Image: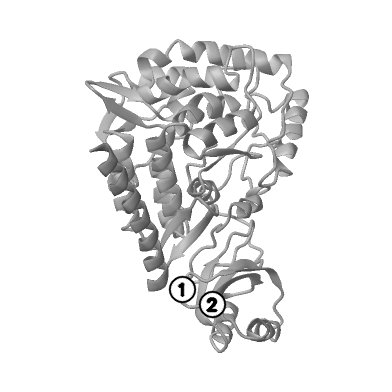
Amino acid sequence: MSAPTLHKCTDATVTPVKTTIHFSITDKVGALDECLTAIKAMNISLTRIESRPSKTAEWDYDFFVDFDATDAEQVSQVAKSLENFAKQVHVVGTGGVSGAATELSDSTPWFPRKMIDLDTFADKVLEMGEELDADHPGAKDAVYRARRSEITNIAKTYKTGQSIPHIEYTPVEIETWTTVFNKLITMFPTHACREHQYVFPLLIQNCGYEPSNIPQLEGVSKFLKDCTGFTLRPVMGLLTSRDFLNGLAFRVFHSTQYIRHHSKPLYTPEPDVCHELLGHVPLFANPDFADFSQEIGLASLGASDSDIERLATIYWFTVEFGICRQGDELRAYGAGLLSSFGELEYCLSDKPEIRPFEPSKVAQQKYPITEYQPVYFVAESFKDAQMRVREFANSLERPFSVRYNAYTESIEILDSKDKVLRYAQSIKSDMLTLVDALEKLA
């Protein structure tokens, strides 16, 4: 479910800001107690503490502690206090509290480090979900609103590791799906990119894609996991750009389960299950597209608000409204196009302006949300787009690099020589495997 623009909170009430501090200690009796006592002496209550084997060459232990900070001065005091007892004290991030108005200057915005951290996004939706704008087709339909509320409440209670709840769709909902499905599949052969066309039959065979059945997210998520490691996660509605993009770093796509109003089956003012399953899902089964999407997500971790806005704009013109060149033809790969009969036809006509995909220029492009795009950007390939986004990400203000550890499903912050060396060792191991495989093929 897309979150194309950066939304600012308008609540003026100053609330505590979620803060994470990382530090390392040597294995000795009482070392951790000294650190915790120093924090307690400042009248701070920790909301979470985690320990891991250190990434350094020493036999140290890494600790991550979370607490709610009142201001930047308090964070600074805690960090300085810990430096008396620990090594490599870093403020990993601040922020991430829905409704928080406090801005800690010169700090890195809080970001999820583990898959389970995505649970904190559950009730942080900005709009839609069970609440509908006055101009929404279902705004005055009490039955539809109640149904939306039922489905969004299921998403609200979902936790990492659980099976995605099964939704028993009604005959009216299935009829709406049927209309959308039948309309779009007539256009895919001539308008969708070859990667989308390649995967779609596999979704029919493995995930129950058919006119009379709305596929369940659980089955689709397992299929994607087998293909590229991507998974789906139910969401109540529109997330902030930061939260949504952060999820992509873990190869997690936040997906709605409710469907558009039956009175206008070929129109929806917000993402719904038709948009997610017919537009997004097929491409997440493609390795190059999955890598490209995760690249945007990794770039968003700890990024400034202005950089998040730029990354969200790049996401908008690629994952949502992207066009690619295949041979002598242009084809659509953006989910906003592949799930919209009208714009899918329009985007490949001679009406819009077509420009080459250059992330630095794309990031500055303004765009309408409620009408067809006047400008589209053409990617030469998903792999090429990934490399261009990676180069763009290197120009952002973030003072460290990150990598996703697929084994632990966690984010590793490469902010010290020891961590970089350990990462290099893992790459060396992979290179040896590659060399061995090439020698056996020779």
Residue 270 at least partly seen: no
6 with respect to 10 (left or right): left
User: Residue 45's spot in the image, x, y percent?
Assistant: 72, 75
Residue at the location (28% across, 45% down)? 361
Q: Is residue 434 above or below residue 185?
A: below
Q: How is the image coloured?
A: one colour
User: Residue 22's spot in the image, x, y percent?
Assistant: 55, 72
Q: Do the CB atoms of the residues marked 2 and 1 lie less than 8 Å apart?
A: yes
Amino acid type at mark 2:
Asp
Q: Nearer the viewer, residue 417 or 27?
A: 27
Q: Quadrant of the N terminus?
A: top right
Amino acid type at mark 1:
Thr
Instruction: Please name the residue that numbered disc 1 is placed on.
Output: 56
User: Residue 111's spot in the image, x, y percent?
Assistant: 54, 59
336 with respect to 273 (left or right): left
272 with respect to 58 (left or right): right
Q: Is residue 354 above or below residue 174?
A: below
Q: Nearer the viewer, residue 442 or 136?
A: 442
User: Residue 131's spot in the image, x, y percent?
Assistant: 69, 37
Residue at the location (37% across, 32% down)? 322
Residue at the location (38% across, 30% down)? 373
Q: Is residue 356 above or below residue 39?
A: above
Secondary structure under tag 1 reads: loop
Secondary structure under tag 2 reads: strand
Q: Quadrant of the C terminus?
A: top left
- Marks 2/1: CA–CA distance: 7 Å
Q: Nearer the viewer, residue 413 or 46?
A: 413
Around disc 1, counting alpha carbons within 10 Å, would you say few (fewer than 14), some (14 to 19), or many (20 or more)? some
Around disc 2, counting alpha carbons within 10 Å, would you say few (fewer than 14), some (14 to 19), or many (20 or more)? some
Instruction: Please name the residue that numbered disc 2 is placed on.
Output: 60
Residue 213 at least partly seen: yes
